[in-house]
Image (cartoon, rainbow, N blue to C red):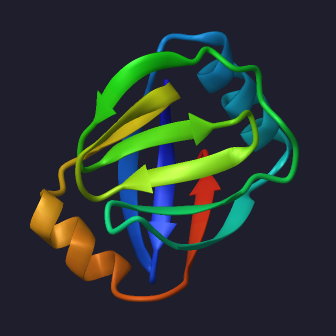
Amino acid sequence: MQIFVSINGEKLSANLAKNSSAKALYKELEKGDIIINASDYGGFEKNGKLPSPLPRNDEQITMQACDIILYSGQTFVLAYDINSWSLTRLGKLIGISKDELKKLLGAGSVEIRLSLK
């Protein structure tokens, strides 16, 4: 399954993970786009609250730049650096490097739009 992630007017593709969390996100996107107001956290991610919780499939993982993560069932995370924690993988951006992603996200808050088209 694939979705689109738009940041500052740039539309990126992402491959979704194979778990119930990613499937639930896809089902939510079938109803319409999701807009997340995300801000920096810890110097390694942008995160923001999803409109509704998703099923959790937490496991101890090390997230990398471009990983799309679910934290605590309702926090959307877009990683731009490395961190290890108990998290749920939702997917991964494709076709963009760590440095390109960091530049695109910029400093401070950013609006992230998730869509199916």
- Which residue lies at the image location 73% right of the left edge and 42% below the top edge? 29
Q: Position of residue 17 (x, y in %)?
A: 46, 20
Q: Residue at x 71, y 66 (%)?
A: 35
Q: Is residue 2 left or right of residue 113?
A: left
In the image shown, does 63 or 113 lie closer to the viewer? 63
| Quarter residue 54 falls in | top right
Say which residue appears at 49% left-offset and 11% top-offset: 18
The quadrant holding residue 36 is bottom right
Relative height, residue 18 to residue 7 (above, below) = above
Q: Is residue 92 above or below residue 108?
A: above
* Residue 34 at x, y percent in the picture: 73, 57
Q: Observer-nearest residue: 107 or 23? A: 107
Can residue 117 be seen in the rendering of this structure? no
Q: Tell me residue 7's x, y (percent).
A: 45, 73
How many marks the image carries: the answer is: 0
What residue is shown at x 73% (from left), y 56% (from top)?
A: 33
Q: Is residue 81 above or below residue 91?
A: below
The percent coordinates of residue 85 (x first, y second) are: 43, 32
Where on the picture, by quarter, is residue 37?
bottom right
Side (left or right) of 112 relative to 55:
left
- Residue 81 visible here: yes
